[in-house]
Amino acid sequence: MLVQICCSVDSHYFLRKLKEIYPGVRIIGYFYDPNIHPYSEFLLRYEDVKKSAKTLGIEVILGDYELDEWFRFVKGLEDEPEKGERCQKCFDFRMEKTAILAKKLRESSITTTLLMSPKKSHSQLEKSLSEICAKFNLDFIAPDFRKNGGSKAQFDLAKKDNLYHQNYCGCMFAMKMQNKASLEFELMSSINHQIQPNSPEDRALFYRNLRVLEEQKGKFKLQKDSFINYRLLRGLVKFDEKVIKSYFLFNSYFERNLVKFSINYECDEFVKNNIIIFSFDKFKELLGLNFKNFDEFLKNPLSVNEELNLREKICEKGSFSPIIVIEKLVPAKVKIEAFSKIYLDVREILVTFW
């Protein structure tokens, strides 16, 4: 039996139930979820599925990340609600790919762990499985393990085994429907590949560290933690209408999206209200950084924690004053175009006991 897998929280319980009911049947997992966005979130969920499946002795095949093909398939249905027509098309898309692989593997039946999700329509999934399997001459099963306390048991098991519990279905359209501002920022990655707090990349690193603790038999607990998060969505500096290379330190918050002023003399540091601009040489000297030139600095970003430590040396702890580094400060009419956000966010933290 080939089982399409969506995430570890759903598969962990679902696969256990399948093994109980079908003890003599070979079960193969197929992680095929091209709807998940961004790609870093896709990889994070796959790694957690692998961890779960390994404990059950189940092989998991990684499907291709065919996001563009998925976008074309659901085009025109972007504004459909959860459990609407877009979800039906999405199920059809994934079940057909599952059926194709099942035929290649000479498996006679398929199912999906999506049947475990409380956010999905069981009737829609059963319809998709029925129609696709009729087309490919396959059998299918569509058990409803959510009944009789199954959903509670599912989440209790996932919590006990420290699985990653995502906060949205997977596709950007579902995320938009949830109307949570912090979720929108999960779709973006820093242009210099810096790992942003509570991003999919950050959570992937968090769960890798968690797995190391598990292997070391360390004592810990997962805990929710509220904090102030930040994203720079756009940052641009112009000198005399010409865009110049610039670097905005983390937590550089702008109340206005456009700031204009003039620099009338060459200098190493310039302050306008709460905005601080450093030449690269002054920034290096002040903070003891070791970069050959500005381009090397731009291509090899500091970590967020390193930037926050640098910020404390320039401003007070907890400062959100804009700090910008440019190659050279010369007389010019300056424009700064910046769109930044500060928002309350919730992350998971590890509380360890020694």
Image (cartoon, rainbow, N blue to C red):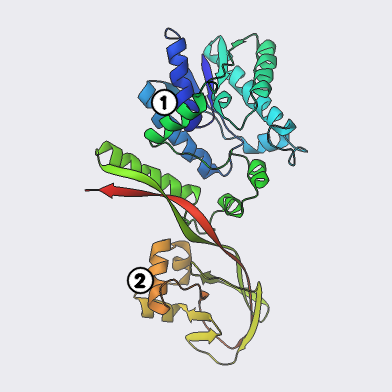
| Residue 133 seen in the current view | yes
Where does residue 337 sit, x and y in percent of width and height? 64, 72
**Farthest residue in the left direction?**
354
- Disc ID at residue 279: none
Q: Residues within 10 Å of mark 1 (few under 14, many from 20)?
A: many
Residue 339 drawn at (x, y percent): 62, 67
Residue 72 position, x and y percent, is 72, 36
In the rendered image of this protein, does residue 27 appear above or below residue 291? above
* Residue ID at (74%, 38%): 80
User: Tag 2's secondary structure?
Assistant: loop
Label 1 or label 2, whichever lies nearer to me, is: 1
Count neighbours of disc 2 (C-alpha within 10 A) and say few if under 14, some if 14 to 19, many if 20 or more. Answer: few
- Could you tell me if the residues under marks 1 and 2 are in contact, i.e. CB atoms within 8 Å? no
Task: Check the image and report above or below for 203 versus 337.
Answer: above
- Closest to the observer, 352 or 71: 352
Residue that sits furthest to the bottom in the current view = 265
Residue on which disc 1 sits: 53
Which mark sits nearer the N-terminus, 1 or 2? 1
Instruction: Report whether 180 appears left or right of 313.
Output: right
Up the image or down, 260 lies above or below 48; here it is below
The residue sitting at 67% across, 14% down in the picture is 130
| Circle 1 SS class | helix
